[in-house]
Image (tube, grey):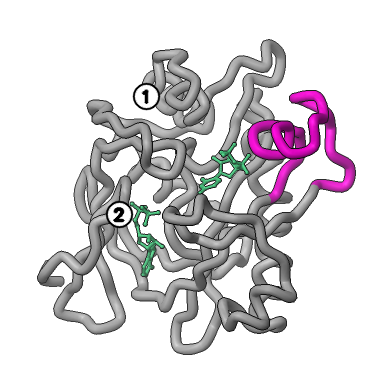
């Protein structure tokens, strides 16, 4: 597979075309951003850790029958994926209250959410990724009702797989964000699953092991990501 021109440089990854019109290369950079790109720093090893973390999780999801864009690891910082027409809607599931939900509703952080909640956000940094709903997504043409139904079903299926996976490693999957896209018309999980896009707490101490360490300036960000990976059986060397 031949790497061609850069198509897009996002906040954390760069996307490259390949000689296959249906395949892209994702390059995970060390850039770390929060607050819609307002806080940005370079964290050594982060690109490598997230690339390998994502490959591991995408493998688990594939085993569970979830269609994903992931094809293969290419190098420490790169992987090959199916080229998707991305749906500009972020799907968020929450098992415990944290972050935006706590700010919006004033509930206590750590409150158990039963059943888990499902929220939609428009992927639009300039507008601060506003919360939307299925009606808005349909009216503005961001996703069809059928696509939204599939996205919701798959997002909850991911929850069943990953909640247990992290629990087995002594961690609570607090919440996470997924992005989907279309591959020849089918809804497929895209982007990444890493501690950048989810919240993970130690089950016993509730210590934060995800990007909140960066958002809140707690330090030890990559050390925490690597610890999460090690608890799941990953190796980063
Ligand atoms: P952002 O765009 O939010 O700054 P990233 O830095 O992670 O995010 O950039 C990666 C970009 O690649 C995102 O816009 C994401 O939607 C897009 N993307 C992820 N997976 C695929 C895929 N399989 N096909 C096409 N685009 C993808
Ligand atoms: O992160 P913040 O508190 O602003 O928003 P949230 O709605 O509480 O985020 C819920 C989950 O989705 C967290 O795990 C975030 O890391 C993740 N998320 C993300 O990865 N990217 C976004 N643009 C928004 C949320």
Residue 115 in the image, given as x and y percentages of width and height: 87, 47
In which image quadrant can residue 134 be found?
bottom right
The residue at which mark 2 appears reads as: 10
Taking the magenta stretch, the answer to whether it contains residue 99 is: yes
Q: Quadrant of ligand 1?
A: bottom left
- Please name the residue shown 36% across and 73% down the image: 82
Q: Position of residue 54 (x, y in %)?
A: 42, 47
Outermost residue on the bottom side: it is 184
Mark 1 and mark 2 lie on one chain; the one further toward the N terminus is 2
The residue wearing badge 1 is 222
Task: Look at the image and give the residue range highlighted in magenta.
Answer: 93-116
Does the magenta run of residues contain 102?
A: yes
Residue sitting at 24 percent across and 53 percent down?
27
Q: Nearer the viewer, residue 204 or 206?
A: 206
Residue at image position (32%, 60%) is 72
Closer to us: 47 or 165: 47
Mark 1 Cα-neighbour bin, 10 Å: few <14, some 14–19, many ≥20: many
Q: Would residue 29 be found to the left or right of residue 184 on screen?
A: left
The residue at label 2 has a CB less than 8 Å from ligand 1: yes
Relative to 28, 211 lies left or right: right
Q: From the viewer's perspective, is 223 left or right of 26? A: right
Foreground residue among 100 and 67:
100
Discs 1/2, front: 2
């Amino acid at each position: 597979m031949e790497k061609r021109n850069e198509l897009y440089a996002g906040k954390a990854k760069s996307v490259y075309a390949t000689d296959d019109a249906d395949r892209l290369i994702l390059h995970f950079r060390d850039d770390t951003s929060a607050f819609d790109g307002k806080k940005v720093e370079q964290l050594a090893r982060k690109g490598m850790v997230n690339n390998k973390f994502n490959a591991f999780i995408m493998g688990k999801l594939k085993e569970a029958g979830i269609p994903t864009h992931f094809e293969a690891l290419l190098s420490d910082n790169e992987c090959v994926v199916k080229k998707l027409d991305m749906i500009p809607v972020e799907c968020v599931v929450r098992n415990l209250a944290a972050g935006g939900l706590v700010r919006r509703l004033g509930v206590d952080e750590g409150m158990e959410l039963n059943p888990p909640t499902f929220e939609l956000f428009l992927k639009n940094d300039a507008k601060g990724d506003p919360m939307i709903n299925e009606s808005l997504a349909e009216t503005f043409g961001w996703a069809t009702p059928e696509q939204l139904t599939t996205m919701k079903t798959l997002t909850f299926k991911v929850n069943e797989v990953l909640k247990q996976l992290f629990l087995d490693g002594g961690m609570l999957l607090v919440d996470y964000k997924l992005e989907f896209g279309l591959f020849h018309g089918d809804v497929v999980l895209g982007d990444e699953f890493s501690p950048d896009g989810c919240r993970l707490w130690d089950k016993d101490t509730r210590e934060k092991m995800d990007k909140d360490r960066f958002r809140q300036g707690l330090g030890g960000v990559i050390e925490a990501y690597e610890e999460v990976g090690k608890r799941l059986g990953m190796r980063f060397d």
